[in-house]
Amino acid sequence: MPRSLLIGVLLLAGLGAAHWWRARPLTPGPGVLAPDVPTQIDLEQGTTLQRGDITLVTRARFELTARVLSREDYHFDAGAKLAPVDLAMGWGRMSDSSVLAGIEISQGNRFYHWHVDAFPIPRREIETSSANMHMIPADNNVRNELERVRQGEVVHLEGFLVDASRPGGWRWRTSMTRDDTGDGACELVYVESIAPAMP
C-alpha cells in the first residue's frame, strides 16, 4: 500500500475513533433521572418564522428535561436541512436505566421504535413517557449543542412546537400531545436552547 494511502486510511480511522469517543453513549445508574412530564403551553396565535423557503408556524411553547434514549442524524431526506437530528426522549420511568435495560430502542426513517420481550412497565406508560422529536436548531450555537448530545444524557431544552411548510405542498406537522403513537406522533421542535441537565 502506498505510504500516502496508508496515512490517509490511518487519519480517517483516527477521526472516526475520535468522533465515536465524543459521541459514545453514557450509561447512568438506575433511578428516575427526569421525573417531570414536558411542559406545553398552546398558542392561540402562532408566530411565523422563515428558514430559507420553509415557513414555520409556532403552535406551542415547549420545555422538557428528559433522557436521550437514542439519536439519529439525517443528511439527505427532505427535512434534513431543517431538522438534522432526531432525539428519542424519555421521562418518568422511561429515564430509569433499570427499566430501559428491558427495552430495545432504535430509530430510522424519522421514526422511533421499541421492542420488549416482557414489559418492565405497562405498554401505555412506555408510549406516553417517551417520544421521537425532530430538532430544528434556532441558530448555529444550538446546532453545535445538538451535535454534542449523547445517548444516555439528560438534557433540558426550551423552544416551540412548530408546523413547517414550503411552496409546492410539502408539509411537516408537529404532534401536539404525548398520548399519540405511530405516524404523525413525533414532535417538530424549534429548539432555542439545549444543555445538559443535572438529575
Image (tube, rainbow, N blue to C red):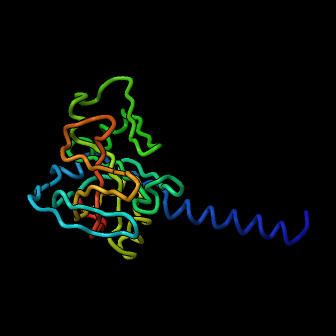
Outermost residue to the front: 168
Return the x and y of residue 187 as percentages of the image width and height: 28, 50
Seen from the viewer's position, the closer of residues 188 and 117 is: 188
Residue 13 shown left or right of residue 171 in the figure: right
Which residue lies at the image location 29% right of the left edge and 65% below the top edge? 191
Quadrant of the snapshot with the N terminus: bottom right
Return the x and y of residue 44 as percentages of the image width and height: 8, 58
Which residue lies at the image location 33% right of the left edge and 46% below the top edge? 132
Return the x and y of residue 189 as percentages of the image width and height: 28, 58
Which residue lies at the image location 77% right of the left edge and 64% below the top edge? 9
- Residue 178: which quarter of the image? top left
Residue 23 shown left or right of residue 68 in the figure: right
Residue 9 shown left or right of residue 15 in the figure: right
Quadrant of the snapshot with the C terminus: bottom left
Residue 166 shown left or right of residue 63 in the figure: right
Seen from the viewer's position, the closer of residues 117 and 84 is: 84
Q: How many marks?
A: 0
Residue 106 to residue 122: above or below: below
Which residue lies at the image location 35% right of the left edge and 67% below the top edge? 137
Seen from the viewer's position, the closer of residues 171 and 7 is: 171
Seen from the viewer's position, the closer of residues 100 and 112 is: 112
Outermost residue to the top: 118
Residue 87 to residue 81: above or below: above
Return the x and y of residue 121 as percentages of the image width and height: 24, 30
- Residue 10: which quarter of the image? bottom right
Residue 117 to residue 96: above or below: above
